[in-house]
Image (tube, rainbow, N blue to C red):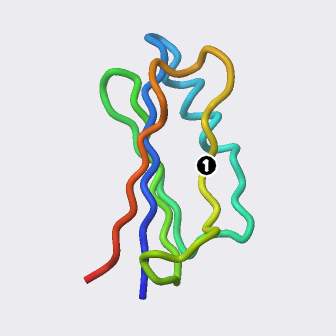
Amino acid sequence: MTVALMWEARAVAGRGEELLAWAGEQELAPAPLRRQTFRAPQDRVLVITWWDAPYDAPGLPELPEPGGELVTRPVHRWRFEQV
């Protein structure tokens, strides 16, 4: 089964490029099957990782919360299974 983890954060106004770079520097161990990064208006960044694991698999690595004053709110996280 494949599970996808979604991580979405909104940067402080004008710091979207910094958040995008920060997200790209975060390594996950082990590495996911696939990883894609997206950006959207309002300095938002979305990272989706795919794993060969069941939906409720514990311990899958996820991107952390960005430190400091980089984001305007806590990170949103979702988990989906492939159908």
Residue 68 against residue 61 in the figure, above or below: above
Specify few, some or many for label 1: CA neighbours under 10 Å numbering under 14, 14-19, or 20 or more: some
Residue 11 lies, in percent from the top left, at: 48, 22
Type of amino acid under label 1: Leu
Q: What residue is at 62 percent from the left and 44 percent from the top? A: 24
Residue 82 against residue 77 in the figure, above or below: below
Tell me the element at label 1: loop
> Which residue is more in the foreground, 74 or 40?
74
Residue 71 lies, in percent from the top left, at: 52, 22
Q: What residue is at 42 percent from the left and 88 percent from the top? A: 1
Residue 40 lies, in percent from the top left, at: 33, 33
> Which residue is more in the foreground, 21 or 1?
1
Q: What residue is at 48 percent from the left and 23 percent from the top? A: 16
Residue 32 lies, in percent from the top left, at: 60, 70
Numbered-mark total: 1
The outermost residue toward the left is 83
The outermost residue toward the top is 13
> Which residue is more in the foreground, 42 or 79?
79
Residue 38 against residue 10 in the figure, above or below: below
Which quadrant does the C terminus fall into? bottom left
Q: What residue is at 47 percent from the left and 50 percent from the top? A: 47
Residue 3 against residue 74 in the figure, above or below: below
- For mark 1, what is the residue? 63
> Which residue is more in the foreground, 49 or 54?
54
Position of 80 with respect to 37 (left or right) is left
The outermost residue toward the bottom is 1
